[in-house]
Image (cartoon, rainbow, N blue to C red):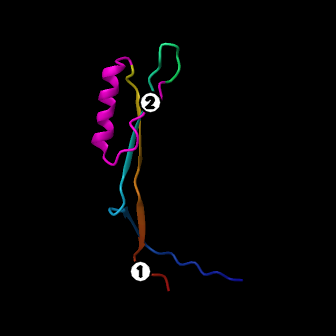
Amino acid sequence: MRKLFRYLNWTVSVDRDREQVHLFLCEGEEEDGTKCRADSGERPDFESARGWTFEHIRERQDHRSFAHMSYTAWHMVPGREPE
């Protein structure tokens, strides 16, 4: 069995037809030393997810460390279709 590989130029870009997802996670500690781990829940826009951090810090003023996770769909298109 033989295979032929062709090197192609590819364009990689954000898939605008698919929704992005953002989530903020509190990394602050409770009084007993355990991590808080409260989160914003998955939200489609960054500002809404980040806004949750301000709501959370109003309740827990000593929780000042957060992680941001995001999901962005990408797609790849060859410069020309393989033969």
Disc with the residue nearer the chain's start (1 vs 2): 2
Q: Amino acid at mark 2?
A: Ala
Q: In the image, is residue 60 above or below residue 13?
A: above
- Residue 20 relative to residue 82: left or right: left
Disc number for residue 47: none
Disc number for residue 80: 1
Q: Position of residue 28 (x, y in %)?
A: 44, 23
- Residue 30 relative to residue 55: left or right: right
Query: Residue 67's image quarter?
Result: top left
Task: Confirm whether the magenta stretch covers residue 39.
Answer: yes
* Region rendered in magenta: 36-62
Callout 1: 10 Å neighbours few (<14), some, many (20+)? few
Q: Amino acid at mark 1?
A: Arg
Disc number for residue 38: 2
Where disc 2 sits, the SS reads loop
Q: In the image, is residue 3 above or below residue 57?
A: below
